[in-house]
Amino acid sequence: MNSIYHVAIIMDGNGRWGLKNKNSRNFGHKAGLDTIEKILKETIKKKVKYLTLYAFSTENWKRPKQEINFLFNLLEDFLIKKTNDLNKNNIKLKIIGKKNLFTPKLKKVLQNAEKITKNNKRIQINLALNYGSKSELVNNVNFLKKNNKTITEKNINNNLYTKNIPDPDLLIRTGSTKRLSNFLLWQLAYTEIFFEKKLWPDFQKKDYIKILKKFQLLKRNIGSI
C-alpha cells in the first residue's frame, strides 16, 4: 500500500458553483473555504504531512478586479481569524508564489501567519498565491546562472518554493477540467493525477477518502517494471 506524504489540490469550480447556486461567483469562493476546512481535517486525520493548495495563479490577475479584491479580502479575514487556531493545532502555513503584487495589509497578514506558525510540525499547508510554475523555473535558472552554479536537478530542487518538501504523491483537480494550469510542473513529474468532476464546494470528505484509497492501491513503477 502506497504511503501518502504530500497531497496537492487545484481547487477549481468555486466561481461556477456560485453562479449555479446564488448567481454570484463570490458566493462560491466563500463556500470553497468550508471545503478547505473539511479536507484539511481529513488530511490531518490521515497523517499526511504536506497539503499544497492552488489558491491564485499568476494568470488569475486577468479576472475582474472586484472578484480579485473579494478573494484577497476573504483570505485576509480568514487568516486574521484563524492563524491562532492554526498555531494551536500545530499547523504550519507557507506561502508559495510572489507576494510583491499584494497590498501592504495582505503582505503583513501573510507574513504574520507564516511567522507565528513556522515551528509547527503536525502538517504544513503550502498556499500557492500569485504562483506560476513557469516563472518559478525561469527565476530559478536565472538565479543559478547569476550565482555561477551548475544547472542540475539538485540545484533546481534547492531553489524552488518547495525546497525541502517532498514532491506531491498525488494531485487532485476538481471542476471537471483536465489540465495542470501552470501548477508545480517540475514537482509533478511522477505524481499520480486524479481529475474530479465535482466543483470544489461540492467536493466532500467521502470523495477525498475515495481518491486517497485509490492512490494507496496503485502500482507505482516510477520508470521501472
Image (cartoon, helix red, strand yellow):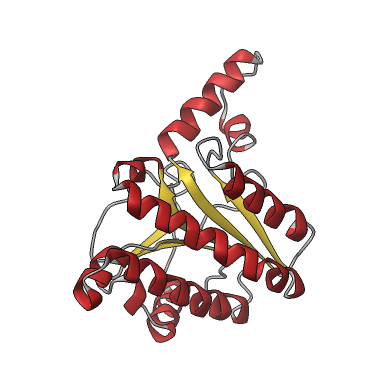
x and y percentages locating residue 102 in the rendered image? 52, 42
Q: Is residue 131 visible to the viewer in this orientation of the structure?
A: yes
Relative placement, left or right, of 34 versus 6 is left
x and y percentages locating residue 86 in the rendered image? 68, 70
Toward the right, the furthest residue is 119
Q: Is residue 191 visible to the viewer in this orientation of the structure?
A: no
x and y percentages locating residue 95 in the rendered image? 59, 50
Numbered-mark total: 0
Q: Quadrant of residue 174?
A: bottom left
Compared with 31, 29 (above or below) is above
Residue at point 28% right, 64% down?
Answer: 25
Toward the bottom, the furthest residue is 206
Residue at point 19% right, 74% down?
Answer: 20
Relative placement, left or right, of 175 versus 114 is left
Q: Nearer the viewer, residue 151 or 89?
A: 89
Q: Quadrant of residue 93?
A: bottom right
Residue at point 43% right, 40% down?
Answer: 132
x and y percentages locating residue 157 in the rendered image? 59, 37
| Image quarter hosting the C terminus | bottom left
Relative placement, left or right, of 36 versus 13 is right
Compared with 125, 182 (above or below) is above
